[in-house]
Image (cartoon, coloured by chain):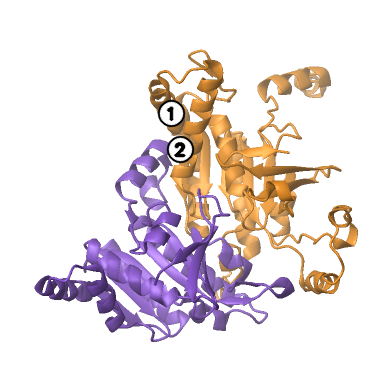
Amino acid sequence: MTSAISWIKVDETAKAALARILTERPSVVLPPPLHRLALRVGNVVEIVGPSPSAKTLILIQTSINCILPKEWKGVQYGGLERPVLFVDLDCRFDVLSLSHALERRITGAYRVRSGVKGNENEYDKELFVACMSRFLYTRCYNTFEFLATLRTLPYRLQKEKEKQGSAVYMLMIDSIGAFYWMDRALPSSSTGSNNRKSLSLQTVAESIVQEIQRLLLVHPMLVLAAKSAAFGDKQSTTHVIRNSGKRFDDKVLDSGGPQKPSYRDYMPSIWQSFVSHRILLRASDGESKHQTHPSFMTEWLLPPLKFSDKFIVNDDGLLVTL
Amino acid sequence: MIESQCRPQFNGLELLEDAQLNKRILSTGCERIDLLLQGGLRVGHVTELAGPSSSGKTQVCLKVASHVARKYSGTVMYFDSGNSFSPKRIVQFLTQESDPANTEVDEIVQRVMSSIVCYSIFDIFTLLDMLHQLMNNLKSEIGCNVRMLIIDSLSSLIAPVLGGGGAHGHALMVTAGFLLKELAHEHNLSIVVTNHMVAGEAGSSKPALGDSWKSIPHVRLLLHRYRATNDSCISILKHPYLNCITVPRALNL
């Protein structure tokens, strides 16, 4: 009798549950252009854009924000001081771009605090070493290596947690759609063996989603996945050709509607439904004063927000919102 | 056992160390290109040279082959798909570069010519075969130490299989791309591929091989030749950390 009653009794009120969730999994605001929404551990954010459009740069800036400490020897850096795992499927990551950006950030923050150049190199090295050791990196050259890596990640992350003292906070996947064409052409198995699952794009996507879900149960993390996308289709290009005679007016383009090139998602539906937030990047037609720097526009597709941000990549490689 | 089954995990410091030790910069032999790329071609990068026909892509490839074979020890592999490899032109580049001391020039020419290995490849399947063979040789460390791989032109091998409704063309292209990236990074090669141009939107031209190819090379360069002055110029389309909108630099070839 007692066991049945204890089963029906409430565990905690909604208020208590909310308080517990907010303290255990606080929401974090990422650096621009992802700053419009507060994200929590367990969210899967997809950053979509054609190539080239600063996606890897956004991932690098967010990693730097995560690996920097909140405060080091009196200087405020405003970071989260947690490790980041970067899974490079595109295999184009250049560690020098990360290290240069980190150095600039550290010296910039130090210069802000003391107006003098002083002994910045000293501060650089120690902090730099501490931060770089919080950046974990793996690369995979095909889907099977990716699946094998995901399978062994719980074990490896556990070892890292014991070594570093804090758990990995973010999982970055550069170009989740990198192996899309190779997977589409996977040969399906012959009718002989019924026991093995036939290989196809769908089953591969299912396995990836399953592995990541299992991983998130044991090691809750914020997942950021970049994806390169193709815009529009044959119809829209002919539409553009027809319009080329007219005078192009910026305002007309920005008003949206049928002139905006449409975005098509090519990932299998199981991945699409796994994603909880989606942001779209697009190169914007630059105004004359910003022509020296590439400028981009962002638009949140999921949840759909009504406004879009503009940002440029300045000389230092930083993203500056306009 | 887990470590041996899948790709290793590194932290930022180990990556930096590897970059500083292994991933050197190879000078191309063309001063202007070196200036544009802040040193030259980087080991571990796949560099794409795109340009309309007769804009100087093959000339740049030959110049780079002769310079790298001369200055750095190691073999240069040249995969030629259009019978455009010319030993005479390489000798010309070498004699242009060195001082007029006759006996030395002969020795240099001898050494360089024996370190450039040229293969004629006419279809994508042979290319994939050759790349797999190269990978196996490098993994088991037989054969000589390869420094650079030049594929002229990669687009003429891939373009015939792209198109049509099937996904196989794209799959072959992406497989070749990832093989090149693996060769470049794991075995410390620098890879140069060339690409031609096709008509794009509103009358402009764009590099061939489409959108799925865009995410494969690390560095994309655009060659352009002005008809009036017969001068070539080169600009960066994409680079991991250099600013893309750079002033085009005129070449002297």
Please name the residue shown 64% across and 52% down the image. A53
Host chain of mark 1:
A
The residue under label 2 is which amino acid type?
Ser
Residue found at x 55% / y 77%: B228
Q: Are marks 2 and 1 in contact (CB under 8 Å)?
A: yes
* Quadrant of the image occupied by residue A245: bottom right
List x then y, in percent, for residue A150: 52, 47
**Residue B107 shows up from this direction:** yes
- Under circle 1, the secondary element is helix
Gap between marks 2 and 1, in whole Å? 8 Å
Mark 1, residue position: A128
Q: Residues within 10 Å of mark 1 (few under 14, many from 20)?
A: many
- Tell me which corner region of the image, top left, top right, bottom left or bottom right, holds residue A61: top right
For badge 1, the amino acid type reads: Phe
Q: Closest to the observer: A290 or A183?
A: A290
Q: Is A94 in front, or is A3?
A: A94
Q: Which residue is mark 2?
A: A99
Residue at 48%, 71% (x, y): give it. B232
Q: In the image, which lettered chain appears orange?
A: A
Q: Which chain is purple?
A: B
Residue A240 image position (x, y, % from top left) = 81, 69
Task: Output the chain of dot 2.
Answer: A
Image position of B215 (left or right of B184): right
- Look at the numbered disc 2 and give the secondary structure of its residue: helix
Q: Earlier in the sequence, mark 2 or mark 1?
A: 2
**Above or below — where is A140 with respect to A222?**
below
- Are there few (<14), some (14-19), or many (20+) residues within 10 Å of tag 2? some
